[in-house]
Image (spheres, rainbow, N blue to C red):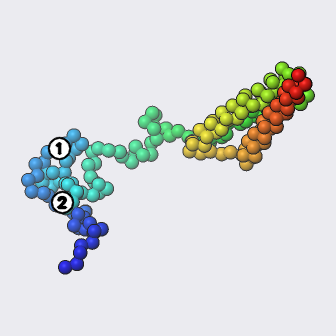
Amino acid sequence: MPDPDPWDFSEYADPDPRQSRPRSGDTGTDGPFGTSGTSTGGQGGRPGDGTAADPFAAGRDSGAGLTAADWTSGPALGGESAALEIARPPLPYLGAAAGIALLALLLGALLGATPGIAITAWVLAGPVAIFVLAYFIKADTTERARPIYAAPSWLRPGYVAVLVLCGVAVVVAALRIAFWVGRL
């Protein structure tokens, strides 16, 4: 006798799931979720005993569940469906980071001979502008998670340009601070 196929589960399958056969000893009781499928002419049963009913059969439990009107009428409040909004990147944060970095670069390059201004330029270009840029990334990621997202094609190069601008402003301000410390 050949070894049985370990992947053959045909003994557990119902030969014709569209025909349900009543089980012996059915009681006809209803459970908390409607007919339990144990009545004499009921649909259902235990999986594997040949009496499991097709859950997608037409005409099954027509008194409960969703109707076609529920699927087409939209949300329950007033029956109107909400329009999908197009999510866009939070460009004001990117612009603010660019503006802060540009201000820091100008302060460091033009007025950086004064130690207080050079330190202020470094703080603006470093922690402040990078924090605003990080907040832009966080808000942009949130917007990207929405159903519809539309970003301009220049967004990624713009982000890289602002990041480079922040780096240049940090280096210029740090050099000004280093030149000041070197003269002490």
Per the rendering, the mark at residue 49 is 2
Classify mark 1: residues with Cα within 10 Å, few (<14), some (14-19) or many (20+). Answer: few
Task: Give 132 or 155, whichever is nearer the viewer.
Answer: 132
Classify mark 2: residues with Cα within 10 Å, few (<14), some (14-19) or many (20+). Answer: few
Q: Which residue is drawn at 80% across and 23% down?
A: 120
Q: Which residue is drawn at 53% across and 39% down?
A: 82
Q: What element carries label 1?
A: strand
Residue 116 lies in what quarter of the image? top right
Image quadrant holding the C terminus, namely: top right
Instruction: State left or right for residue 109 relative to residue 170.
Output: right
Instruction: State left or right for residue 45 relative to residue 86.
Output: left
In the rendering, at what x and y percent does residue 37 appear? 19, 51
Of tags 1 and 2, the one toward the viewer is 2
Reading the image, the residue beneath label 1 is 30
In the rendering, at what x and y percent does residue 14 appear? 23, 64
In the rendering, at what x and y percent does residue 138 appear? 62, 36
Task: Give 179 or 81, whichever is nearer the viewer.
Answer: 179
Q: What residue type is labelled 2?
A: Asp
Q: Work out how far the residue at label 1 is from the one at label 2, CA to CA, in angstroms.
A: 20 Å
Q: Which residue is drawn at 14% across and 45% down?
A: 29
Q: Earlier in the sequence, mark 1 or mark 2?
A: 1
Q: Is mark 2 on a helix, strand or loop?
A: loop
